[in-house]
Amino acid sequence: MPLRLTSAVVVGASGGIGGALIRALAEAAAYAPIFALSRSGASVPQGVRTVPIDLCDEATIAAAAARVGEAGQVGLVIVATGLLHRAGVSPEKTVRALDPAAMATVFSVNTIGPALVAKHFVPLLARGERCVFAALSARVGSIGDNRLGGWYAYRASKAALNQILRTLAIEVARSRPEAIVVGLHPGTVASDLSRPFRPDPTADGVLSPEESAAHLLRVLSGLGANDTGGVFAWDGSPIPA
């Protein structure tokens, strides 16, 4: 009897890390089908299914989940989205720079969006076998590791995301004891998110999207149910809350 494959879902597939994750998953062929979800559309390998989604519009999240659910149970969901800066939004260097509208935008993308993805996609996760729900977090979301200050909204939104993932892990374990729910720190990646702060993609400590994606998938493959609720860096090291 051939091995039954579950599907994989990457939310944010048009981004640097999301696109690299899609390509790596397609090459590995460990999941089928593979769904690339994004707001603006993504260039994907042959056979990968694209589905529109907007993390700030729950109706599109529910519709995307319905599309994915038609293919059967899901073995892997990765939310590879994040907002640090864009027009009208930038990391704050001081509390005087706080802007409520900008903060709400950052939380909408970094915290509320992934939570709503969990709301609609967790019910699709496979039962009775290993499955994974992961979301890109950030080391700067760690309260215990915060020694530099600044970046109020981004730090707080990722810290809130970590708490949501921890709470979700506790709930999911009741019905899916083999499930793994984790946050992932992708490292400093040469992408649109980090470019204004690390403009040289060849600098020491800067990973390409492909390198980061390979590391993250390797970390996920090595995690077990006892790791659920944690946050892990690209090198596999745990990040304190």
Image (cartoon, rainbow, N blue to C red):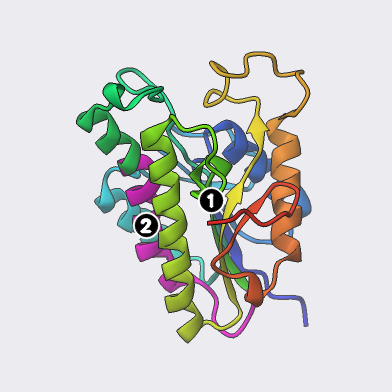
Pointers 1 and 2 in contact (CB under 8 A)?
no
Residue at image point 53% right, 72% down: 73
Q: In the rendered structure, which segment of residues is drawn in magenta? A: 108-130
Residue identifier under label 1:
144
Residue 56, above or below 182: above
In this orientation, which residue lies closer to the viewer: 9 or 43?
A: 9
Q: How many discs appear? A: 2
* Relative to 39, 7 lies left or right: right
Kindly identify the amino acid type of the residue bearing the numbered disc 2. Ala
Taking the magenta stretch, the answer to whether it contains residue 113 is yes
Residue identifier under label 2:
115
Taking the magenta stretch, the answer to whether it contains residue 150 is no
Kindly identify the amino acid type of the residue bearing the numbered disc 1. Gly
In this orientation, which residue lies closer to the viewer: 89 or 63?
A: 89
Residue 26 seen from this side: no
Q: Position of residue 206 (x, y in %)?
A: 72, 27
Q: Position of residue 64 (x, y in %)?
A: 38, 54
In this orientation, which residue lies closer to the viewer: 127 or 189?
A: 189
Residue at image point 72% right, 54% down: 237
User: What is the quadrant of residue 227 in the picture?
Assistant: bottom right
User: What is the quadrant of residue 131 in the picture?
Assistant: bottom right
Q: Earlier in the sequence, mark 1 or mark 2?
A: 2
